Amino acid sequence: PPPPFTTSTLQQEAARKLLLDLCWQGGRRQCPRCRTVDPYALAEGRLRCPGCRYTFHDFTGRWLNLTGLSCRQWLTVAQAFAQELGTREVAEQAAISYNTALKALTALRLAIVARGADALQMLTRETGLASLLEGGRLHAGAETHPPGGFPVYGLMSRGRHAFVDLLPELSVESILHFNHNFHLRVRRHGHILVTDRYRSYEALLVCGDDSLPYHYLRAHQGEIFAENGGCPFWTYSRERLGRFKGLSWQRFPLYLKELELRYNNQSTDLAPQLLAALCA
């Protein structure tokens, strides 16, 4: 006989239904490869496409399928993340290991990036994010150095909203050149460089490592616009970036896009948006 339904079983079923509703909005399933609708059911909950014959299940090809978390655990992780809890606290609340929590949060942050209008530009080897997803699996190991030099990001505000842009036309060498020859003010915070205003951006940001020639920077008189209250998003982000452990050039865009989402939604509960991103 089937096991009796306990409270935890009912909660797991409710969590699964919530995520399924987000995955299959409108109720009609479709093949994740060819988009043919109405696959037929096989054993153990699997589905098969009547068009291309691909066998899959409800969460195939979705961000939440990158880990072994249960639906109930994903709901806990998303809620804890929305509350800005750290990795160790997320692990404790979801009853998972620290490494599993770190993997889940990486998948969640990648899902946030993937929802952005600039997703195709951000999820590349240039930013380092593509190598986290090689072969459709998460990889924890970071590349030693970016293939095209450390990426440069621009911070821009429009009203109460902030935007983080990748600027492939710029490099660290560009910033050093502007600093030396055009008196662009630059400040260092660990491995992060933040500049004064540049064109329409309140600041440029670079996250490097010990290979950068920090000693080459020139100190120019005057305050940096973003660090003197001119960029509320940088004021919001600077302290939060200091909380992240193991900050590297490769994970830097994950944190920037997370902070962009948080800043632009300070008065709303992020959990529904996070779950929708995971189910995409």
Image (tube, grey):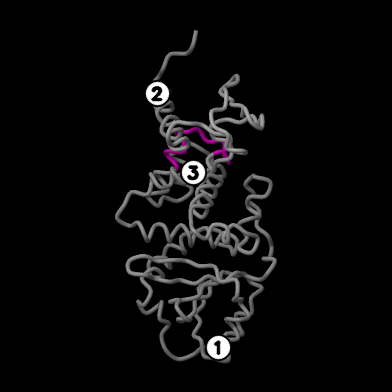
Q: Main secondary structure of the magenta part?
A: helix
Rounded to the nearest whole Å, what is the CA distance between mark 2 and mark 1? Answer: 62 Å
Residue interval drawn in magenta: 65-77
Residue at left offset 59%, top offset 26%: 47
Secondary structure type for disc 1: loop
Residue 278 tag number? 3
* SS label for mark 2: helix
- The location of residue 206, given as percent across then percent down, is 55, 72
Which residue corresponds to mark 2?
10
Label 2 neighbourhood size at 10 Å, few (<14), some (14-19), many (20+)?
A: few
Query: Closer to the camera, 61 or 34?
Result: 34
Q: Amino acid at mark 2?
A: Leu
Pointer 2 or 1: first along the chain = 2
In terms of depth relative to the viewer, which is nearer, 161 or 237? 161
Whether residue 262 sits left or right of residue 191 in the image: it is left
Name the element at disc 3: helix
Name the outermost residue toward the top.
1
Q: Residue at x 59, y 25 (%)?
A: 46
Q: CA distance from mark 3 to mark 1?
A: 44 Å
In front of the other: label 2 or label 3?
Answer: 3
Residue 38 x/y as whole percent:
54, 28
Q: Residues within 10 Å of mark 1 (few under 14, many from 20)?
A: some
